[in-house]
Image: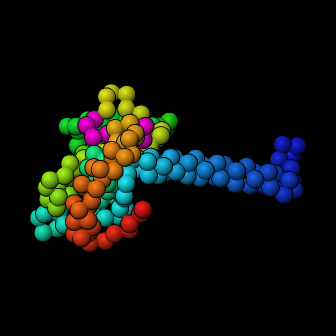
Amino acid sequence: MSEFFPVDQSQWLLPLASILVLLVAWLFYRRRMRATGLQHVLNEISYDRIEGLLIPDGSDGEIQIEHLLLTSHGLLIVDIKDVVGTVFGSDKMQDWTVISDNRRYTFPNPQPALIDRIAAVRHIVRQVPVAGRIVFLEGAEFKKGVPEFVADTDELRAEFFEQDRAAGKVNFEAFKPHWDLVRKHALGVDARN
């Protein structure tokens, strides 16, 4: 047995520790690349962006918005879901389930919260289109159909990217006063340009 596990632990601990460090670095790199891809898409489709926005919800409360983007199509609320595996969810289900390898877990249907966020922004800016998307990052797969408001980064880019930036700038200028109104109502802002 000692030929498989040397008595001197330094002979096998160092290679094992090196493998673990490489594995953790690889996992960190993959996660970072997924986030970087998302940030790139958000930058491509937006003229301005606010992260971590807290606004009045219209009912004497507050609501938090993860990402609010000013696009050539209007204002866009983006909620991010970073899950890996097959997602089972629908418009009418209260909880959605993720199954991956040997793990299974549920999370609340994110659509009602997104609808509340859209309503809160529309309460502030009534004459501007306000849309919302729940973006699932790479690694999530819907095999039984994709629920309303759900997209991946490619679909988000295809729907909101403006090929003609000059034409998009005209819409941007028209939406800018409404964007400024949202900023004025913001209770906590981390602005990203």
- Residue 86 seen in this snapshot: no
Give the x, y percent position of residue 50: 35, 62
For the N terminus, the image quarter is top right
- Residue 167 seen in this snapshot: yes
Front-most of residues 69 and 110: 69
Above-or-below relation of 191 to 81: below
Q: What residue appears at the point 43 percent right and 48 percent down from the top-left corner? A: 44
Q: What residue appears at the point 20 percent right and 48 percent down from the top-left corner? A: 129
Q: What residue appears at the point 11 percent right and 64 percent down from the top-left corner? A: 59
**Residue 159: quarter of image:** top left
Above-or-below relation of 41 to 86: below
Taking the image as shown, residue 94 lies to the left or right of residue 29, namely: left
**Residue 162: quarter of image:** top left
Give the x, y percent position of residue 81: 39, 48
Taking the image as shown, residue 72 lies to the left or right of residue 27, namely: left
Q: Is residue 154 magenta?
A: yes
**What is the span of residues highlighted in magenta in the rendered image?**
147-155
Taking the image as shown, residue 27 lies to the left or right of residue 34, namely: right
Q: What residue appears at the point 37 percent right and 54 percent down from the top-left corner? A: 47
Taking the image as shown, residue 99 lies to the left or right of residue 31, namely: left
Give the x, y percent position of residue 18: 75, 53
